[in-house]
Image (cartoon, rainbow, N blue to C red):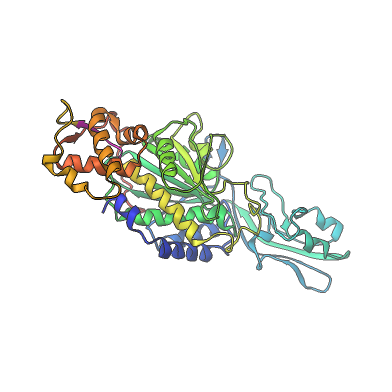
Amino acid sequence: MDIRDIAREFDAASTGEAMHRLVAELYPICRSITGEGFRETLRALRRFVDIGIREVPTGTKAFDWTVPKEWNIRDAWIKDASGRRVVDFRDSSLHIMSYSTPVHATMTLAELKEHLHTIPEKPDLIPYRTSYYRENWGFCLSQNALAGLADGLYEVCIDSTLADGSLTYGEYYLPGEMPDEVLVSCHACHPSMCNDNLSGVVLATFAAKLLTGAARRYSYRFLFIPGAIGSITWLSLNEEKAAGIKHGLVAACVGDGGPMTYKKSRRGDAEIDRAVLHVLKHRGAPYAVREFSPYGYDERQYCSPGFNLPVGSLTRTPHGAFPEYHTSADNLEFVRGPFLADALGAYLDVFHVLEANRRYRSLNPMCEPQLGRRGLYSAIGGRTDSPAQEMALLWVLNQADGEHTLLDIAERAGLPFDAIDGAARLLRAHELIEECAPVEPAAALHGADAGGA
């Protein structure tokens, strides 16, 4: 089965339900850019695909960065004078500022407030805060909860460790007919937020599972990494492999109800940019397009000038553009199974375009061949879409000069890629066109990392 068939036939309803169940399973885990929470998340994903788990020691240089100390947390709380936990890490992992150093002390409310974080304009919500690269500690709570704290003494405990260890990331590699790669990257380092990051993690996992059973022209590499430092570390350790990435997408924020949104690669006109925009144009649903900027998710690392990889970001509502972003409102009710499955379908459609986007040469270039005697007109006669199918045949025949790809033809004809691809398959079966060799030789070597081990 090829990716086109998978894109057409996967059950969106049941797949969406399964994706949401996995989000719900991962939701309580306290993840950060290092630590056991990240490893626990990857181990859960290994039930679906055989993700390889890599460890990079603290202190490893990664270009201008250094792999930080590993952070782990067991418990954290604030108790009032009666011994009641007024803020409890066990209720939500968002209550602790990520990478908080250990503390156990008694202090006044005024002293404590120096370490409390709220969102005054969203008084019911808990914010997400971090202190990765500057040692500090803190708690996050709603503004309403803060307003309910009376003057007095409070006992504060953060049972955490910050010590030499390692940075963990997951990698799943699927070899194809060619060594040239399609990259799918997602960040898996946020605690208890469903759209920003779990939706992308789950989409990448399900895409990897579906593609494992597909016939593949390209090789596919799936990265499950901590944001920023993860992609920087991977790139620093894998410059040769990075050279083989011909197309890439960063997956995040794909579970809300907003329209699909594409942020272009730094190149702006790479094949991945054209493929995504073509798919979105012909899906029959609203969509948005953003130009590249050096702010956002890990696309900014893949698109840094030293690499300039063709990597865009395909989301629904982009980061920072929905009010639930980086708050406790980014929860299980905010993301929905149908939205997750719809986004997965868009990714599969993009993969199909990349897989099938080839150049053909006409074997009957002197005027158009007689299609009727070959039964091609009868094969499409009587169908309501026959005019479009007929035009697809004629466009492919006319443009099959060894220079134009099927995506070139679809864009020029204003027809869906699937119609042009279907016409090419039909013409090839009747020996009216032949596939041309790729214009450029493959740039990367087949790695010895087939599968996820």
* Left or right for 408, reference 331: left
Q: Is residue 322 visible?
A: yes
Q: Is residue 50 above or below residue 132?
A: below
The boundaries of the magenta stretch are 357-361
Task: Answer with the quarter of the image where residue 141 lies.
Answer: bottom right
Say which residue appears at 28% left-offset and 30% top-offset.
441
> Residue reaching furthest right?
151
Q: Nearer the viewer, residue 105 or 345?
A: 345
Q: Nearer the viewer, residue 432 or 129?
A: 432
Residue 292, given in percent of the width and then of the height, sits at 53, 34
- Quadrant in which the C terminus is drawn: bottom left
Say which residue appears at 14% left-offset and 40% top-offset.
372
* Left or right for 8, reference 113: left
> Residue reaching furthest top?
366
- Quadrant in which the N terminus is drawn: bottom left
> Residue reaching furthest left?
373
Residue 347, given in percent of the width and then of the height, sits at 41, 48
Task: Answer with the quarter of the image where residue 438 lies.
Answer: top left
Residue 200, given in percent of the width and then of the height, sits at 49, 52
Q: Nearer the viewer, residue 355 or 413?
A: 413
Q: Is residue 360 magenta?
A: yes
